[in-house]
Amino acid sequence: MVGRKPLVDPLRIINAVLYYKSAVLEENNGVKKIVVASNTVWSDISNRLGGSISKSALYIFVQQGRHGIHEKLGIGIANKRLDSENNVQSVEPIVAFDESSDSSGDNVDNLPSKHFTITLSVDEWKQIEPNEVLYKNKNSFRSYLVLPKGSWTNILAEHTWMHTNLPCCIAFRRAKVTDEGNHFIVIDGRCSICYSYFKGVIFEKPSENSRVLMECTYTGQFDDPHKIIKKRRLTGKAKINVVSAIVNCGKSSETYREFEAVRLMKPGDPEPAIIPSGGALRTLKWRHNSEKLRNKDTITALALMKEEEEYKNVLQDMGCFPFFLHYQSSEQIHVYRDYCRNCPQPKIIIDATGSVISNFKKCGMEKTKSLFLYEILVYDASKKHSFTVSNMISERHTNIAIFNWFARWLNCNVPSPKETVCDQSLALISAIVQCFTQYSSLQEYLNVCADLTLNQLDSNSHWLPRCFVRTDVAHFIKMITR
Ligand SMILES: [Zn+2]
């Protein structure tokens, strides 16, 4: 038969299949047969061949025994007959332990191998311990023992790292549990970078409340440099732990990674696949935070919050075009009043920063201009601590916008400050003068200050400014050094 020239050299396919011989074959009632088409080994082989042949094409290649692959795998024609049973098998979660799988691969014998014993603590075993699950099989039900989803792979990955210190990213694929016989649990997995093969066996069913030993072998080219860096996908309990650290406890992604590195690594170790990448952590955090949003649109979400019992007294005033938000809690008001009771000359520090709040789309339309976070701070010298009194987020930075915020804060019946400190922003200084002194403009305030320094104003005069406006040294130095 004359056909097209094959895209991939059949010899390469055969070599790749033989490399995975132990995973390609399984033994049932003493008959070796090819694993089902849905088995992940086909995609592994396809990956090994650089994706030049699809996993289903590979399955067909092996299943139909092309280029004498059956003889090379050491199986007979009986396999074809068993194929219909193959499909039935695929719905069953367990099959009898394949005794031949670790000795059948001659090519595996030449590969480097590591042997180690994982000791699972009582607590870890409680998370891994097989459960009984019922499966429908035609008209009857059969019960199987399976490992509970979600934690066993993470626990094994961490133990394997502790024993091997390899950069391998092992995907655990099968866990066979057999109640009778001399292999209680058999687990296999493969590094998705170097394709090394992991096999772990718990020989006997452990007694209650005892530590459990798993005999493990790891075979393959694991010492070769891993050029691609792959990370374990965060699942189950590992994911819950990460979420609790970075979302609930507010730890930054990089701090979390540092803590994990201190816990798991020694100097000189490669970064293990079980420490998630910073990007993955940030995405997870973002996803979790956006799930908690009341609404995708920030303005709508704030409007909804304003109606909530918890926030209705915190969010004082807000506007949309341009966007602004004034907020402070009643506790902040109480602390400030308390401070003023003990301090006859209350002093506030006002600052604004543009680097903390990112822009957002207003009602799905235009994006906000640069948003500044404004803050009124107080340093309590007697108690030696500072606290925030009020905040504003605003896209407008005029003195009217700032004045409105101050006025709203004073309207909460708080004592007016006798001294303010801020940077050289004209809008800020003007707003301070208009709100906290008896003068309507900065110019008038400066005139009065000039009179005062030239002794042209009596120190008891009612024209004496009610608030002393100061600009801070740090900002002044920064300005003149530019
Ligand atoms: Zn590897």
Image (spheres, rainbow, N blue to C red):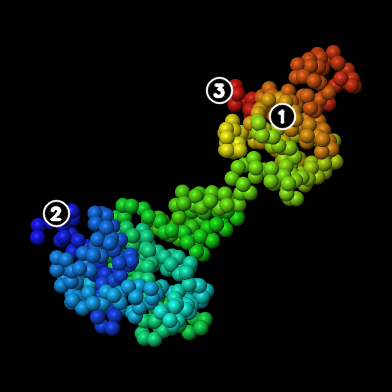
Identified at 9% across, 57% down, the residue is: 2
Using a 10 Å C-alpha cutoff, classify the residue at mark 1 as few (fewer than 14 neighbours), some (14 to 19) or many (20 or more). many
User: Could you say whether the residue bearing mark 1 is in a helix, strand or loop?
Assistant: helix
Residue with the mark numbered 3:
482
Say what amino acid the circle numbered 3 marks.
Arg
Mark in front: 2 vs 3 = 2
Q: How many marks?
A: 3
Extreme-front residue of the structure: 139
Q: Quadrant of residue 245?
A: bottom right
Identified at 18% across, 64% down, the residue is: 14
Say what amino acid the circle numbered 2 marks.
Arg
User: Could you say whether the residue bearing mark 3 is in a helix, strand or loop?
Assistant: loop
Q: Looking at the image, is 476 positioned above or below residue 27?
A: above
Mark in front: 3 vs 1 = 1
Residue with the mark numbered 2:
4
**Left or right: residue 341 compared with residue 227:** right
Mark in front: 2 vs 1 = 2
Identified at 60% across, 22% down, the residue is: 480
User: Could you say whether the residue bearing mark 2 is in a helix, strand or loop?
Assistant: loop
Q: Position of residue 323 (x, y in %)?
A: 65, 33
Whether label 1 lies within 8 Å of ligand 1 gets the answer no
Q: Nearer the viewer, residue 23 or 273?
A: 23
